[in-house]
C-alpha cells in the first residue's frame, strides 16, 4: 500500500488542512459541478506495475470488489441529490477482475450515463464471459461506452519496462479485439520518460495508424498523458492566492466535478472519496453517502498541487 505521509522533499508541508507551512490560507475546492462519479472496482490486478499510484497487484485487496447492488445504491443517490452527473467511471485495480463488472456497467448504461472503463485490455477483459458481456453492452449501448486502455508508452520496450515483459503485445491484442468489434477506445499514457507533449502525441499517432485504431492522438480526451505522481519531489502548497497567480479557477480542478466510491477491506459499506488519486489518505474520505461527499476539499497533498492544479490533469473523459 502506498504511504501518503509527506516525503522528505516536502517535510513540514501538507500538515494542516487549513493553513500551509508558511501560515497562508490553504486553497480549497467546492463540489460546484458534479459531472463524474467513479467506482473503484477493487485493487486486485492481473499485473503489478512499477509505479502504480494505487499499488494494485495480484495480491493487494486493500480495496475489495464493489458489487452491482452497491453501485445501484449510489446511482439512486445521484437521483436523490440531483447531481448533474453525465459520466460514470470504473477504475481499479483491473476492473475486469471484478466478476460483476458487466452487471455494474449495464446498471450505469441503463440510466443513460456515459460510461468510461479504465483497463489494461489484457487477460481479464479477454475471458470469454467478459467478452460476451461486452459485446452485449456494445450492441445495446455502444454509443455510451468507452474503454480507456493503459498504454504507458507507444514503444513496446518502455511500456513493458513498467508493466512486465510481453504486456504491450497482450494489450495490443485486446485493443485489436475491441477495434474489430466497434468499441470506442481512448488511451492513457505517461510522461515518465521525458518526451515532450508533441513527441508523445506524434508517437502515439504512429502507433494508432499502424494498428488502425480510431483514436485521435491530439485530442486530450482520447489520448490522455498523465504527469507523474512522485511524492519524493518537492512541490509548492496551493494557497488561496494561487488561483489569481496561476490564472486558474477552483472549478477547473478535478475535485470540483468528481468523487470516487471505494470499498475498504473489512468495511461494512463503501465510502466516498474526494479524489481518485488518494484512496489511502484518510482525510480525503468524506463519508459513506453522496450527501456527506458534498463538503469542500482542502488541497492538502502533493498530488493536489503537482497533478491537478499545476499539471492540469483529470481522470475523466
Image (cartoon, rainbow, N blue to C red):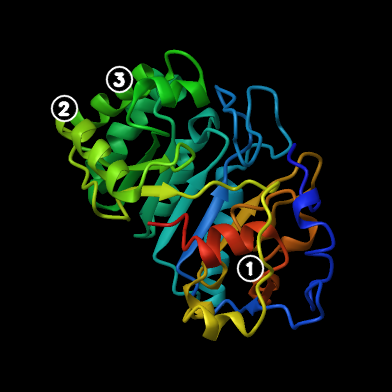
The x and y percentages for residue 99 are 53, 30
**Residue at position x 37%, y 59% from top?**
113
**Residue at position x 80%, y 76% from top?**
22
Q: Residue 290 carries which label?
A: 1
Q: Which mark is residue 210?
A: 2
User: Is residue 316 visible to the viewer in this orientation of the structure?
Assistant: yes
Left or right: 32, with 196 as reference point: right
Of residue 72 and residue 85, the one placed in the foreground of this image is 85
The residues tagged by marks 2 and 3 sit, at their Cα atoms, a distance apart of 13 Å
SS state under label 1: loop
Q: Mark 3 points at which residue?
A: 173
Q: Residues within 10 Å of mark 3 (few under 14, many from 20)?
A: some
Left or right: 102, with 138 as reference point: right
Q: Considering the image in quadrants, where does the N terminus appear?
A: top right
Of residue 15 and residue 178, the one placed in the foreground of this image is 15
Q: Considering only vertical position in the picture, is 198 above or below 44?
A: below
Amino acid at each position: 500500500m502506498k504511504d501518503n505521509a509527506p516525503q522528505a522533499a516536502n517535510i513540514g508541508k501538507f500538515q494542516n488542512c487549513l493553513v500551509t507551512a508558511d501560515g497562508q490560507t490553504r486553497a480549497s475546492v467546492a463540489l460546484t459541478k458534479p459531472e463524474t462519479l467513479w467506482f473503484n472496482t477493487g485493487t486486485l490486478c492481473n499485473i503489478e506495475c512499477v509505479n502504480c499510484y494505487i499499488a494494485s497487484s495480484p495480491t493487494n485487496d486493500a480495496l475489495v470488489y464493489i458489487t452491482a447492488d452497491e453501485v445501484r445504491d449510489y446511482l439512486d443517490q445521484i437521483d436523490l441529490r440531483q447531481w448533474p452527473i453525465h459520466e460514470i467511471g470504473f477504475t481499479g485495480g483491473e476492473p475486469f477482475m471484478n466478476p460483476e463488472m458487466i452487471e455494474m456497467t449495464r446498471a450505469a448504461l441503463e440510466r443513460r450515463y456515459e460510461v468510461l472503463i479504465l483497463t489494461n485490455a489484457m487477460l481479464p477483459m479477454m475471458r470469454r464471459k467478459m467478452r460476451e458481456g461486452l459485446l452485449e453492452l456494445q450492441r445495446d449501448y455502444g454509443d455510451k461506452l468507452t474503454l480507456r486502455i493503459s498504454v504507458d508508452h507507444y514503444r513496446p520496450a518502455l511500456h513493458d519496462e513498467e508493466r512486465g515483459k510481453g504486456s504491450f503485445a497482450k494489450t495490443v491484442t485486446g485493443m485489436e479485439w475491441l477495434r474489430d468489434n466497434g468499441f470506442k477506445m481512448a488511451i492513457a499514457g505517461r510522461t515518465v520518460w521525458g518526451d515532450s507533449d508533441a513527441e508523445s502525441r506524434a508517437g502515439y499517432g504512429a502507433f494508432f495508424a499502424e494498428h488502425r485504431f480510431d483514436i485521435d492522438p491530439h485530442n486530450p480526451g482520447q489520448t490522455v498523458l498523465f504527469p507523474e505522481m512522485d511524492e519524493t519531489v518537492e512541490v509548492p502548497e496551493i494557497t488561496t492566492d494561487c488561483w489569481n497567480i496561476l490564472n486558474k479557477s477552483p472549478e477547473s480542478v478535478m475535485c470540483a466535478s468528481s468523487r470516487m466510491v471505494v470499498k475498504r477491506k473489512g468495511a461494512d459499506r463503501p465510502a466516498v472519496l474526494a479524489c481518485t488519486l488518494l484512496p489511502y489518505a484518510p482525510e480525503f474520505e468524506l463519508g459513506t453517502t453522496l450527501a456527506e461527499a458534498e463538503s469542500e476539499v482542502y488541497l492538502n497533498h502533493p498530488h493536489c498541487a503537482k497533478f491537478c492544479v499545476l499539471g492540469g490533469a483529470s481522470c475523466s473523459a
